């Protein structure tokens, strides 16, 4: 085996122990309860070893939370690679995000909508260098660490094709995120079933977008239509 490859695999394996330990603690006790000592103890290493692989606890937590959202990131990259029409791409991306985030709202909030988001997203490139996605040409929407840019890149084709009024871009983007945040909050505080929340969320989204689509433009697919699509086999 190539010595460099062997070293990289060893690095991946050891980092994986720490990442998995951090995720396990976060799921049981909450992200705020993570500490170097707890993670090292669960991973079966001494605390000092962690610093051979991560700068500090914040970097380790960022890697662990990014790892928690990779199903979404990898699925998102796959959907974007299929060159579907812009509205279907948008709604499938939101469906995927809901399906992945609702069962684990804490990790998704940490990565995408918390005071830690900028730092966590700044680690995306480093994460993918160590744990590369199968598709080596990851779409820049997936890896872009600027959430404002990420949002605009995803929605841009819908506005470019004239489906929505460009002057309402911020309003439309913000509304979608606010609705998602509302459902995430209900799951955390009221015990709303995450599986039941997905079609309800899509109902809000499709109804809102249908209300704002410009006359004579493409019809917004229904929740039923979006849920029928097997995005794993596009």
Image (spheres, helix red, strand yellow):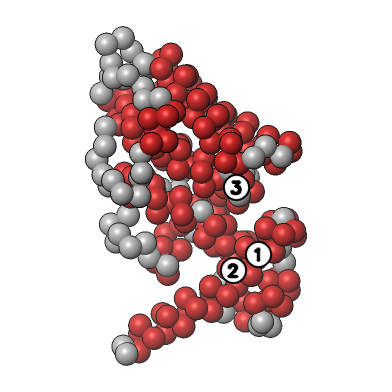
For the question of whether residue 113 can be seen, the reply is no
Q: Secondary structure at mark 2?
A: helix
For the question of whether residue 223 can be seen, the reply is yes
Q: Is residue 19 above or below residue 143?
A: below
| Residue at numbered disc 2 | 20
Residue at image position (47%, 56%) is 70
| Residue at numbered disc 1 | 24
Q: Classify 10 Å Cα crowding around label 1: few (below 14), some (14-19), many (20 and above).
A: some
* Residue 234 placement, left or right of 144: left
| Nearest to the observer: residue 200 or residue 140 | 200
Q: Secondary structure at mark 1?
A: helix
Q: Is residue 35 above or below residue 151?
A: below
Work out whether mark 1 precedes mark 3 in sequence or the reverse, and give the earlier one.
1
In the rendered view of the protein, which quadrant contains the N terminus? Answer: bottom left
Residue 134 percent location from the top left of the image: 33, 63
Q: Classify 10 Å Cα crowding around label 2: few (below 14), some (14-19), many (20 and above).
A: some
Residue 123 percent location from the top left of the image: 49, 58
Location of residue 74 by image quarter: bottom left
Cα–Cα span, label 1 and label 3? 14 Å
Cα–Cα span, label 2 and label 3? 17 Å
Q: Is residue 56 above or below residue 5?
A: above
Q: Secondary structure at mark 3?
A: loop
Q: Are marks 1 and 2 in contact (CB under 8 Å)?
A: yes
Which is more foreground, mark 2 or mark 3? 3
Work out whether mark 2 precedes mark 3 in sequence or the reverse, and give the earlier one.
2
Q: Are marks 2 and 3 in contact (CB under 8 Å)?
A: no
| Residue at numbered disc 3 | 103
Which is more foreground, mark 1 or mark 3? 3
Residue at image position (38%, 36%) is 228
Residue 27 percent location from the top left of the image: 67, 58
* Residue 182 placement, left or right of 75: right
The disc at residue 77 is none
């Amino acid at each position: 085996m190539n010595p460099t490859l062997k070293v990289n695999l060893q690095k991946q394996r050891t980092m994986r122990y720490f990442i998995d330990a951090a995720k396990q603690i976060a799921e049981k006790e909450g992200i705020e309860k993570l500490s170097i000592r707890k993670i090292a103890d669960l991973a079966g290493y001494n605390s000092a070893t962690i610093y051979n692989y991560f700068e500090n606890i914040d970097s380790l937590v960022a890697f662990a939370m990014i790892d928690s959202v990779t199903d979404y990131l990898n699925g998102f990259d796959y959907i974007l690679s299929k060159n579907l029409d812009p509205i279907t791409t948008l709604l499938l991306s939101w469906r995927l995000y809901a399906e992945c985030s609702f069962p684990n709202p804490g990790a998704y909030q940490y990565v995408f909508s918390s005071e830690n988001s900028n730092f966590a997203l700044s680690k995306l490139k480093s994460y993918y260098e160590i744990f590369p996605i199968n598709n080596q040409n990851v779409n820049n929407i997936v890896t872009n660490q600027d959430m404002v840019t990420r949002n605009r890149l995803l929605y841009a084709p819908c506005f470019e094709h004239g489906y929505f009024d460009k002057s309402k871009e911020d309003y439309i983007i913000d509304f979608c995120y606010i609705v998602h945040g509302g459902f995430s909050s209900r799951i955390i505080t009221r015990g709303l079933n995450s599986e039941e929340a997905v079609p309800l969320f899509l109902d809000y989204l499709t109804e809102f977008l249908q209300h704002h689509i410009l006359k004579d433009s493409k019809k917004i697919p229904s929740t039923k239509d979006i849920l029928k699509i097997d995005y794993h086999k596009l």
